[in-house]
Image (cartoon, grey):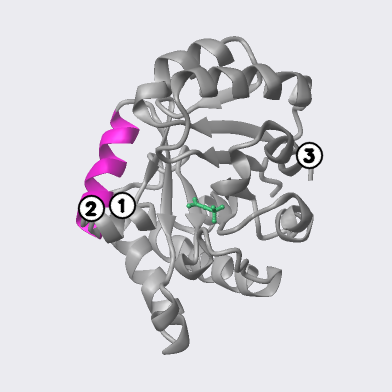
Amino acid sequence: MSRKALIAANWKMYKTPAEGQAFVEAFLPLVAGHTRDEIALFPSPVLLPTVTAACNASNVAVGGTHTLIGHSERRQYFAETDEIVNKKLHTALKHGIVPIVCVGEVLAEREAGKTASVLQTQVTGAFVGITPEAAAPIVIAYEPVWAIGTGKTATPEIAVDAHKIIRAEVAKLLGANVAAAIRILYGGSVKPDNATALIGQEEIDGALVGGASLKPDSFAAIVKY
Ligand code: PGA
């Protein structure tokens, strides 16, 4: 089954509304007519009105219609547990918002050989009470915590292995059809020069990009990997 890639910009708390507006004005012409991939921007809540208006009637979606859940910084600094991730996932689906559920191991877990069990626990915890019928809009992002904002990217092999573990867990919970259709993005120091090697993998259905999404030309280069 072919899955349309989704390339998403995670701006976190960066940018003022004026900077968000300037980004969109520079970015839209760079990706005009680009339909191979879905494109989404996740600005901070204060930027939502400006960025949503600026992207109106374009090929770029904005967080608010999509939402990030369980990002490692939320798990780490705001005690977002698997239980809270699960509640947010149900709420997003109820309101027709496309959820991107982030999972990923920290370095100590990887070094202790616990990557598979951490990912399985996070996926299982997130999906409690989700039926195969309700699961269609859900996107998962695999973000190894040791690769976020560190400049250390997972190799395509490491990312593909993790994606296979996640997809197998989804198959166990929701069946083979949902697992074959669900998009799993990779995130963690994605840059223009490593985007093709990562997103080009059959198992990798797009990217969640932090630092390299803040400049229009660098994010456009990733979109056009
Ligand atoms: P990064 O961030 O691309 O700067 O590593 C990714 C993320 O936090 O989603």
Residue range (magenta): 82-94
Please indicate, yes or no, whether residue 170 appears anywhere in the rendered image: yes
As for residue 60 lying within the magenta part, the answer is no
Query: Which element is circle 2 on?
Result: loop
Q: Nearer the viewer, mark 2 or mark 3?
A: 2
Q: Position of residue 54 (x, y in %)?
A: 56, 12
How far apart marks 1 and 2 lie (CA) works out to 5 Å
Which residue is identified by label 2? 78
Q: Which mark, residue 10?
A: none
116 or 170: nearer the viewer: 116
In the picture of the structure, the residue carrying the numbered disc 1 is 74
Using the image, tell me which numbered label, if any, was put on residue 224.
3
Q: Residues within 10 Å of mark 1 (few under 14, many from 20)?
A: some
User: At which x and y percent is residue 127?
Assistant: 32, 54
Which of disc 1 and disc 3 is earlier in sequence? Answer: 1
Amino acid carrying label 1: it is Arg
Residue placed most toward the observer, 57 or 212:
212
Q: Are marks 1 and 2 in contact (CB under 8 Å)?
A: yes
User: In x, y percent, where is residue 171?
Assistant: 48, 62
